[in-house]
Amino acid sequence: MANLTVTDVRLTPILVADPPLLNTQGVHQPYTPRLIVEVVTADGVTGVGETYGDTKYLELARPFAEKLKGRQVSDLNGLFAVADEVAVDASRVSEAVDVGGLRGVQTADKLRLSVLSGFEVACLDALGKSLGLPVHALLGGKVRDAVEYSAYLFYKWAEHPAGVRSEQDDWGAALDPAGVVEQARKFKERYGFSSFKLKGGVFPPDEEIAAVRALAQAFPGHPLRLDPNGAWSVGTSVKVAEELGDVLEYLEDPALGTPAMAEVAERTGVPLATNMCVTTFAEIKEAFTQGAVQVVLSDHHYWGGLRNTQQLAAICRTFGVGVSMHSNTHLGISLAAMTHVAATVPNLHHACDSHYPWQSEDVLTERLVFENGSVRVPDAPGLGVELDRDRLALLHRRWLDDDGTLRDRDDAAAMRIADPEWATPAMPRW
Ligand SMILES: O=C([O-])C(=O)C[C@H](O)[C@@H](O)C(=O)[O-]
Ligand SMILES: [Mg+2]
């Protein structure tokens, strides 16, 4: 019988290269923080997880890790009790919608869940390796063999501002409809994606409408999405929905907050998706009863892990609301975790988001591969991925060497390097 007792927990904060991707808040930093979690059992089995690596997450992860020692990796329900014991510094959260966060309301619970998810995935990986079972089997079994992802298109500079230390990428600039179409072509060529999401809220809506129209012309029949992260008023949202209604699979978070989304939903037939107004279980009732959203983009990081993601999917199914997946900058551990849980969700009818193609660096010995836009669901024990300790050490070294400037993701601060006058836009921006 395997000894599933946690004897050691390792936390490794890293900085990962990120291209100059634009959103309504600003631009991505040249390096972004992530946290790699390792949980070791008495048998010497190591499970890996990944989550946000900014200071406020690290502050919680450290005491969480201490409390995990001596517990069983199979005690997944117990992780929530551990999370409740970890104190959150009140200055780290505001109950209001955090427009700077791009991921909705900021609460102490959500912060705890975002940390918990890294431990839950590491425990599931260790448990799976100990029992010789893939994570999807621990979650009840896969209902599909591959999970489809969509191309995540961004307006983008060719490179980070001059004088800023950064890694080169070969995607080029995308600042107008032709650039966006060119980027989409590369995504299709390289990964076989057949649906496209454009991160909007960067340029005035007419320019973004033109970019989506250009995509529709270049890729007829392909599902398209546009996501301005709540940057538009209700009126602007309705206008964009009217103009693009014939080509959009859904419009994502056109306006900020459930009441505004509900008003948009009432005035258009275009389905609305969200990763901003429904990001916690507490927000579901109001949004669903008001018909504010037709698709919830789950994210196992802030929903509190893979099993909470399954619960969210079950609630969505009950209410006839669609479900898919949101993504931030993440590495292969999280892509594997997303793929395992997505494989178990019967009502997943939209290709999931993933930033992974934008990440040229990883901490795995082998990168996960997209074939025809999909990732095959791993059947090896655990997550089916292996940590590359040299890569991990290298990216950790970068974090150690940083003076603190990059340890907390701040897209507005990154933008101010190029444009010192830049201030986080007041919402609605248009
Ligand atoms: O709304 C979304 O899809 C996101 O929040 C994803 C990311 O935060 C994305 O906007 C980004 O990284 O710029
Ligand atoms: Mg979004």
Image (cartoon, grey):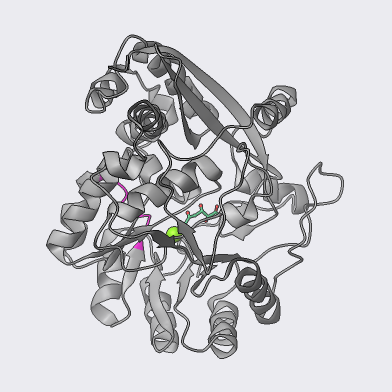
x and y, in percent, of residue 271 in the image: 31, 75
- SS assignment for the magenta stretch, majority: loop
x and y, in percent, of residue 389 in the image: 64, 27
Vertical side of 360 occupied by 12: above or below: above
Front position in the image: 89 or 249:
249
x and y, in percent, of residue 113 in the image: 34, 34
| Region rendered in magenta | 274-280
Vertical side of 35 occupied by 331: above or below: below
Residue 396, by quadrant, is top right
Front position in the image: 311 or 374:
374
Q: Residue at x 57, y 90 (%)?
A: 217
Residue 392, by quadrant, is top right
Residue sitting farthest toward the right: 163
Left or right: where does residue 390 sit relative to residue 242?
right
Q: Indicate whether residue 163 is drawn in magenta.
A: no
x and y, in percent, of residue 280 in the image: 28, 45
Left or right: where does residue 359 sit relative to residue 170?
left
Left or right: where does residue 35 sit relative to residue 156?
left
Q: Residue at x 70, y 28 (%)?
A: 390
Using the rendered image of the protein, determine whether residue 201 is visible from the camera's viewpoint. no
Q: Residue at x 34, y 66 (%)?
A: 273
The total of numbered circles placed on residues is 0
Q: Residue at x 58, y 84 (%)?
A: 210
Vertical side of 396 occupied by 201: above or below: below
Front position in the image: 352 or 270:
352
Which image quarter is the N terminus in? Answer: top left
